[in-house]
Amino acid sequence: EEQTEAMIRFIDGLPDGRVVLVSITDTAMAATRPLVAEIYTALRSLGAPANMEPIGYRMPFAMIGVKGLPEGEAVMAMDKTKVIVRLEARVTAAAADAGGATAAVSLSDKTVERYDITDHILATQEETADGDGKDGSSSGSGQSNGPAAMEE
C-alpha cells in the first residue's frame, strides 16, 4: 500500500507534458489484493484508456504515457505471463508559446510487439526433436524474430 500511494503521488505531482514509461515485469500486487482504483485514475492522467483492463497478477504491463495526454492516447500492452512486451512511439513536443505555456506533447508511430517465450521454447524443442535447429536458432512463434529483433 505504501508503494502504491507513492506511485500515485509521483504521477499526480508530475507537470503536464512529462513523458512517463511504466513497466511491470512480474507483478505489482499480491494475488489476493488487486490494485486500487486510484492507480488507474493516475494512469489515465498519463493517457491510459478510460476502460482499461485491470492489471492482473503476474501479468507483464508496459506503457508510454504523457502527463495530461487525453485518455486512450498512451501506448500500452498487457499480456499473460511469460510474454515480453515491447513498445515504441515517437514523442513530439509542439513549440511553447511566447507566454511560456507548457508545450503540447503527443505520441505517434506507436507500435506494440509481443514475444511469447513459452511458444519459442516449445518450437525450439520441436525443431530439435525433428532434427532441425541443431544450431539452436529458431524464429519462435512468428510474432517477432525474438530477443535480437527486440534490441533494434
Image (cartoon, rainbow, N blue to C red):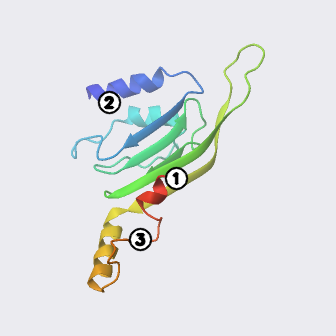
Farthest-out residue, right: 98
Q: Are marks 1 and 3 in contact (CB under 8 Å)?
A: no
* Res 40 quadrant in image: top left
Local secondary structure at mark 1: loop
Residue 35 at least partly seen: yes
> Residue 86 versus residue 44: which sits nearer the camera?
86
Sequence-wise, the earlier of marks 3 and 2 is 2
What mark, if any, has residue 67 been given in the picture? none
Tell me the kind of residue under disc 2.
Thr
Is 76 left, or right, of 105 in this rendering?
A: left
Q: Residue at x 42, y 62 (%)?
A: 146
Residue 99 position within the rendered picture, expressed as x and y whole percent measured from the top left: 75, 13
The residue identified by callout 2 is 4
Residue 105 position within the rendered picture, expressed as x and y whole percent measured from the top left: 65, 32
Q: Residue at x 43, y 71 (%)?
A: 139
Query: In the rendered image of this protein, does residue 16 appear above or below residue 85?
Result: above
The residue identified by callout 3 is 141
Tell me the kind of residue under disc 3.
Ser
Q: Are marks 2 and 1 in contact (CB under 8 Å)?
A: no
| Placement of the N terminus among the 4 image quadrants | top left
The answer for how far apart the CA atoms under marks 1 and 3 are is 19 Å
The answer for how far apart the CA atoms under marks 3 and 2 are is 35 Å
Local secondary structure at mark 2: helix
The residue identified by callout 1 is 152
> Residue 107 versus residue 51: which sits nearer the camera?
107
